Image: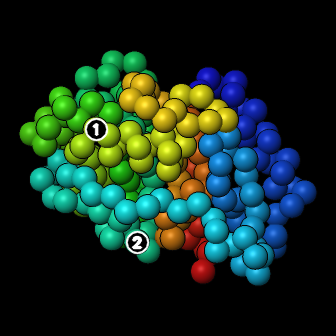
Amino acid sequence: MSISKNIILIFLITMVSCKTKPSTLSLPFINKPDFTPEWIAKNDPSYSAIHTIPSFSFTDQDNKTVTEKDVDGKIYVADFIFTRCGSICPKMTTNMGTLQEKFKNDPDILLLSHSVTPEMDSVPVLKKYATERGVISGKWHLLTGNKDDIYRLAKKEYYAGDTIGYYQAGNEFLHTENFILVDRQRRIRGVYNGTLPLEMERLIDDIGELKKEE
């Protein structure tokens, strides 16, 4: 997604929120791959059908199995990178590090970076990458695993394809700068350009808003 598209997306979210935001909600829900923000109150019949990230199982840099149970009741930020990337990934990793520093003492906040080249990003490779970049074990999980599972989760559940409006269904290479904010019930609440420091400020503010929700 280009910077201009992100600016348009932020504008649209702001416009929609001004018109339809229920007083009990701080952030919208993202239920569709076009990132349309939806403000759904708890008493709305569609509340129980809000899109939720399903179960998953991957391995992190410490050779620990990480599943949906590890993030249940937590707020987390997810992205998709690969260790050999020389373009957007270094910026994304730096900005994820900013989030780690901000929330390193907050047990309610976790970070999940999924490798899109898991065949190359083995546990030892991820461990070396984590050590070089100051990744805190247990706070920021660098994940590898079955490529089909990662791509299916990324494209179909996180809407992390390279094009707004639909998700890529196959094994087309995934290279997206999106950071995805997920709430305590594994529902998507925001999408951010992970290469921009300014977007991290917005993301930090939104995490603060989510922490206030019951």
Q: Residue at x 75, y 32 (%)?
A: 8
Please state which amino acid type lies under the numbered disc 2: Asp
In the figure, is residue 18 to the left or right of 148?
right
Separation (CA) of disc 1 from disc 2: 23 Å
Sequence order check, earlier mark of 1 and 2: 2
Labelled disc at residue 214: none
Q: Residue furthest left?
A: 124
Q: Please provide percent x and percent y for residue 124.
A: 9, 39
Does residue 129 appear anywhere in the picture?
no
When the figure is inspected, residue 142 is found, relative to residue 65, above or below; the finding is above
Answer whether labels 1 and 2 touch (C-beta < 8 Å): no
Q: Quadrant of the N terminus?
A: top right
Q: Secondary structure at mark 1?
A: helix
Q: Specify the amino acid type for callout 1.
A: Lys
Dot 2 crowding, Cα within 10 Å, few <14, some 14–19, many 20+? some
Regarding mark 2 in the picture, which secondary structure is present there? loop
- Residue 5 pos. (x, y %): 69, 28
Q: Residue furthest right?
A: 19
Quadrant for the C terminus in the image: bottom right
Q: Look at discs 1 and 2 and give the one toward the viewer.
A: 1
- Scheme of image coloration: rainbow
Residue 42 is drawn in which quadrant? bottom right
Query: On residue 72, which mark appears?
Result: 2
Find residue 147 and name its label: 1
Identified at 29% across, 63% down, the residue is 67
Viewer-proximal residue among 206 and 118: 118
- Residue 22 visible in image: yes
Question: 51 or 180, which is in the foreground?
Answer: 51
x, y percentage for residue 204?
A: 55, 53
Q: Position of residue 193 (x, y in %)?
A: 56, 35
Q: Which residue is at the front of the view, 24 or 203?
A: 24
Residue for point 48% across, 35% down: 169
